[in-house]
């Protein structure tokens, strides 16, 4: 199925997707699903769990009529959208819904089971996904503190290669006007500046002060300079691209009991080069010692898997390594702005990415001999801290 001229998969649906959890009931879900499953009825909808963050994960139990049962929709599903009161998530819910609709044609991609997607396409960013309830699935959700070992990381990289191969150098992606280009959109290219107030919170913590290099305190503008150069470097690349996850740390994955790692939380899906995903997953999942011993071999495992799946024009090992050397800055930025209360432990990841940057000479590689592209005042125009953290910068 392709999008309608209005950009929506089911233009016959009237009204907008709801903004409040109180509107989600059996009657609403019946109406939502009928364009995709004619004759379906949701006879009852029972809440199991609500988890709010950047998006809402609403786990529910459904009682379906025979049409719904024949369609293969299970009794337990997870509805994902933004029903979090007071938190605007921009367009990420629509982006994720569009991604899953696009990915429905990739039978071998390591993704969760998806039963329905829809979005408004009116500029409001609303989207909804009905997916399998992984809380009941055999396996476990990933976390930033999981120790996978070198073999576990190798299997994860092969999973990423399978994902990337599904759209490798695909003309289909060029027609997806909704899909941002990696590091060529404000969420990516201004990520460090937008989140700098949260970075400042972590910079004040004694444990970070002991861990981080002195330049992070003495010349923090170097961080912004390196980040801008990473963005420019990515935009200049001409090697084959694919659809990338964009946020491929292990906390955004689920390891099934059969050993398959599937990838979740597609709010940063992008068209780009695969090295962003490879570096972000590998450098974050390996201990510093493991990475120093095995990163080159693991990169070769990823490349071999990608090529075995038919990808042509893949960078050779040396060229791919040069890509990898630049990408620690992305992990440095994302994890320095992480608050542990959001569900993932940031400090171990910060240590790994900063250590990789030092070993790879990343900052000098990106900035040496180049004038800064801009000279922002760090923290100015950044996203305001929520009330829970404002007092930490007032001390």
Image (tube, grey):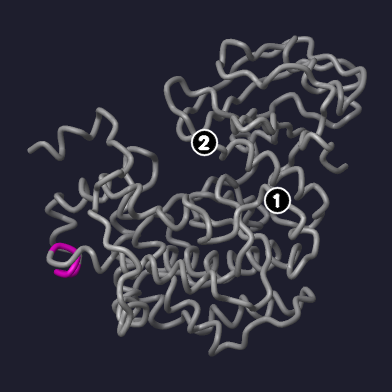
Q: Quarter of the image for the N terminus: give it.
A: top right
- Which label belongs to residue 230? none
Callout 1: 10 Å neighbours few (<14), some, many (20+)? few
Q: In which quarter of the image is residue 354?
A: bottom left
Callout 2: 10 Å neighbours few (<14), some, many (20+)? some
Pointer 1 residue = 177
Mark positioned earlier in the residue sequence (1 or 2) = 2
Q: In this view, does 292 lie to the left or right of 376?
A: right
Q: Residue at x 80, y 21 (%)?
A: 13
Q: Is residue 33 left or right of residue 70?
A: left
Pointer 2 residue = 90
Asked if residue 221 is positioned above or below residue 98 in the image, the reply reads: below
Q: Residue at x 23, y 35 (%)?
A: 389
In this view, the mark in front (1 or 2): 1
Asked if residue 317 is positioned above or below residue 109 in the image, the reply reads: below
- In three-dimensional space, the C-alpha distance between marks 1 and 2, rounded to whole angstroms, equals 17 Å
Viewer-side residue, 59 vs 338: 338
Q: Is residue 197 left or right of residue 141?
A: left
Q: Quarter of the image for the C terminus: give it.
A: top left
Q: In this view, does 74 lie to the left or right of 334?
A: right
Residue 214 inside the magenta-drawn segment: yes
Instruction: Point out the stretch of residues depicted in magenta.
Output: 213-217
Q: Quadrant of residue 33?
A: top right
How far across and how far down the image is residue 315, in percent?
Answer: 63, 84
Tally of numbered tags: 2
Q: Which residue is drawn at 18% across and 57% down?
A: 208
Q: Is the magenta stretch mostly helix, strand or loop?
A: helix
Secondary structure of the residue carrying tag 2 is loop
How far across and how far down the image is residue 261, in percent?
Answer: 62, 56
How far across and how far down the image is residue 60, in percent?
Answer: 64, 21
């Amino acid at each position: 199925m392709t999008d309608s001229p209005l950009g929506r998969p089911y233009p016959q649906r009237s009204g907008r997707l709801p903004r409040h959890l109180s509107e989600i009931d059996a009657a609403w879900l019946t109406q939502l699903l009928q364009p995709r499953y004619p004759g379906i009825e949701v006879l009852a909808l029972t809440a199991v769990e609500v988890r709010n963050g950047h998006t809402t994960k609403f786990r529910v139990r459904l009682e379906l009529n025979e049409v719904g049962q024949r369609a293969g929709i299970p009794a337990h599903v997870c509805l994902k959208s933004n029903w979090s009161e007071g938190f605007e998530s921009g367009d990420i819910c629509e982006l994720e819904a569009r991604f899953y609709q696009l990915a429905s044609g990739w039978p071998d991609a390591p993704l969760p089971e998806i039963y329905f997607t829809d979005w408004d396409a009116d500029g409001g960013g609303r989207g909804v996904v009905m997916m399998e309830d992984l809380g009941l699935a055999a396996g476990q959700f990933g976390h930033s503190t999981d120790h996978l070992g070198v073999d576990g990381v190798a299997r994860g990289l092969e999973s990423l290669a399978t994902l990337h191969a599904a759209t490798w150098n695909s003309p289909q992606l060029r027609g997806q006007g909704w899909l941002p280009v990696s590091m060529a959109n404000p969420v990516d290219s201004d990520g460090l500046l937008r989140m700098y107030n949260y970075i400042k919170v972590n910079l004040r913590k004694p444990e970070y002060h002991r861990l981080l290099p002195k330049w992070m305190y003495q010349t923090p503008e170097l961080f912004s300079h390196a980040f801008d150069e990473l963005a420019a470097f990515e935009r200049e690349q001409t090697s084959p691209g694919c659809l990338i996850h964009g946020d491929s740390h292990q906390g955004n994955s689920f390891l099934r009991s059969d050993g398959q790692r599937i990838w979740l939380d597609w709010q940063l899906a992008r068209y780009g080069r695969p090295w962003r995903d490879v570096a972000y997953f590998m450098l974050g999942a390996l201990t510093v010692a493991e990475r120093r011993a095995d990163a080159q071999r693991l990169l070769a495992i990823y490349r071999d898997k990608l090529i075995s799946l038919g990808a042509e024009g893949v960078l050779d090992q040396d060229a791919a390594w040069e890509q990898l050397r630049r990408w620690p800055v992305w992990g440095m930025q994302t994890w320095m702005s992480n608050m542990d209360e959001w569900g993932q432990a940031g400090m171990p990841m910060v240590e790994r990415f900063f250590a990789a940057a030092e070993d790879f000479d990343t900052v000098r590689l990106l900035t040496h001999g180049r004038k800064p592209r801009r000279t922002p005042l760090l923290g100015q125009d950044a996203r305001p801290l929520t009330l829970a953290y404002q007092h930490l910068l007032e001390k």
